[in-house]
Amino acid sequence: MLLHSFIPEQLYYLMNDTSESTSPPIESSQTIDPQRQETAKEYAAIGRKLFVVELVIGLAYVLIWIVAGISPWLRDQIYQFTTATWLSVPLFAVGFALPQMVLTAPLDYYSGFVLPHRYGQSNQTLQAWLIDQAKGLVLAGVLGIIVLEIIYLLLSFAPDTWWLWTAAVMLIFSVLLSNLAPVLIFPLFFTYHPLENEALVERLTRLADQAGAKVQGVYTFDMSSKTSAANAALMGLGNTRRIVLGDTLVENFTIDEIETVLAHELGHHVHKDLVTGIAVQSTLTLIGFYLADVVMRWGIATFGYHGLNDPATLPLLMVAMMVFGLVTMPLGNIWSRWREVAADTYALETTRNPQAFISAMTRLANQNLADTDPPTWVEFLLHSHPSISKRVALAEAFEG
C-alpha cells in the first residue's frame, strides 16, 4: 500500500543535532504553481510511457520463454544436477530472473535515477541509489523464493486445491509483513527516530487516541536523504503501529497541515480500510491463482510439461498473474479512490479545518510535483487516489 498522509502556532524544525529551534510559521500555500504543474504533467506523461514500455518488455520476455521452449530447456539443465523441487525451483527462478534484470537495467536506471534527478525529485547519489537497489533486490529475492517454495510445495502435495491454500498463505504473509515492516523492512532504507517536538507529538497522539488507534510513538525519518518530496504514514499493526513523518514534511508543512494529513490516515484506521483492503486483495489473489491453475494446466497439455510442480511452469504462473493484475488494476483503483474520499471526509469532519486541508493538498502538489488534474482515463486506470483538484473541491464544498 502507498504511503500517504498528515500539523495556529508555529513550525518547529527538527535539527540533525537533535536540538529544536523555533522558526517563523510557513505561509499557507493554497495556490498551485502553474509552472510546476506544466513540469508535473510532463513528468507524469513520461512516467506513463515508461510504465507501458516496462509492461510490454515484461510480458514479451515471459511469452518468449514459453513459446520458444526456453523453460523446458532450463529445467532439463537443472535436472542434470538435481530433481528436488525445493532446490530446482529457486535455481530455475534465478535463471529466469537474471536475464530480465540485465535486459531492463538501463530502463530501471533511467526511470529510477536519471529522470527523478532531471525533475528535481531525487537527492541520492548514484552510489546510494545503487545500494538501495541492491537492498531491494536481495529483499525481493528472499521473499520471492520463500513464496515460490511454498507455492510449488503446495503444487506437489495438493495439486487440485493448491490455489486455495496458496491464497490463504498469502493472506497470512500479508498480515505478517504489515506487522513487521516498520521494524524489519523500513529501517533497511531509512533512518528514523522519535520526533523531538513534544507539542507536536502530543497533538498527533491525541488525534490518534481520538480515532482509537493505539500507536507506539511518533517518528521522523530521513526522507530528504533520497527525495525532495514529502510523505508520511500510519505504519504497522498492533504492537508495531506508529506514526511516521518524513523530515521533508516536518520542515515544510505547518502544524495544522500535518494534523489534517494524519487525520486522513486515521480515517483509514477508523473505517478499517487496512483490514478490508487485505480482504479485497486476498479475494483477488484467490481468483488470480485459480485462473493461474487453469493456464498452467493448459500449458502442461500444450507444451508437454511434466506436471504442475514442474519448474518450467513458472513463466506460465507469472504471465497469468501479470495479465490478471493488469485487468483488475482499474477495479482495485476504483475501490481505493472510494476509500480515499471517505478518509478525506473523516479528516475534514475531525479537524474542522478545510483551509489546512486545502493548503496541505496544494503544498503536496507543488512539492511532490503531482499533476493536480490528470486526464480522466489516466485517473480511472492508474491512480489509487483521487486527483488533487477533486480533493481540494471536496474540502471547498465542506467549507461552504
Image: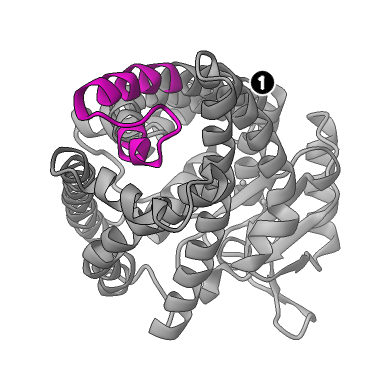
Q: How is the image coloured?
A: one colour
Side (left or right) of 84 relative to 63: right
Residue 213: image location, x then y, percent: 81, 34
The residue where tag 1 is placed is 271
Is residue 297 within the magenta segment?
A: yes
Q: Residue at coordinates 59% horizontally, 46% vertically from top-left?
A: 146
Residue 275: image location, x then y, percent: 66, 24
Side (left or right) of 189 relative to 396: right
- Residue 219 visible? The answer is yes
- Mark 1 surroundings within 10 Å by alpha-carbon count, few (fewer than 14), some (14 through 19), many (20 or more): some
Q: So how many labels did they put on this image? A: 1
Secondary structure of residue under mark 1: loop
| Image height of 20 relative to 202, above or below | below
Residue 140: image location, x then y, percent: 51, 55
Is residue 232 within the magenta segment?
A: no
Q: Residue at coordinates 27% horizontally, 62% vertically from top-left?
A: 99
Residue 359: image location, x then y, percent: 49, 47
- The amino acid sitting under disc 1 is His
Side (left or right) of 369 relative to 397: left
Q: Residue at coordinates 43% horizontally, 77% vertically from top-left?
A: 130
**Residue 193: quarter of image:** bottom right
Provide the major secondary structure of the magenta segment.
helix
Query: Which residues are drawn in magenta?
Result: 289-318
Q: Residue at coordinates 41% horizontally, 27% vertically from top-left?
A: 308
Furthest residue in direction front, as rendered = 80
- Between residues 325 and 87, which one lies in front from this camera angle? 87
- Residue 8 visible? The answer is no
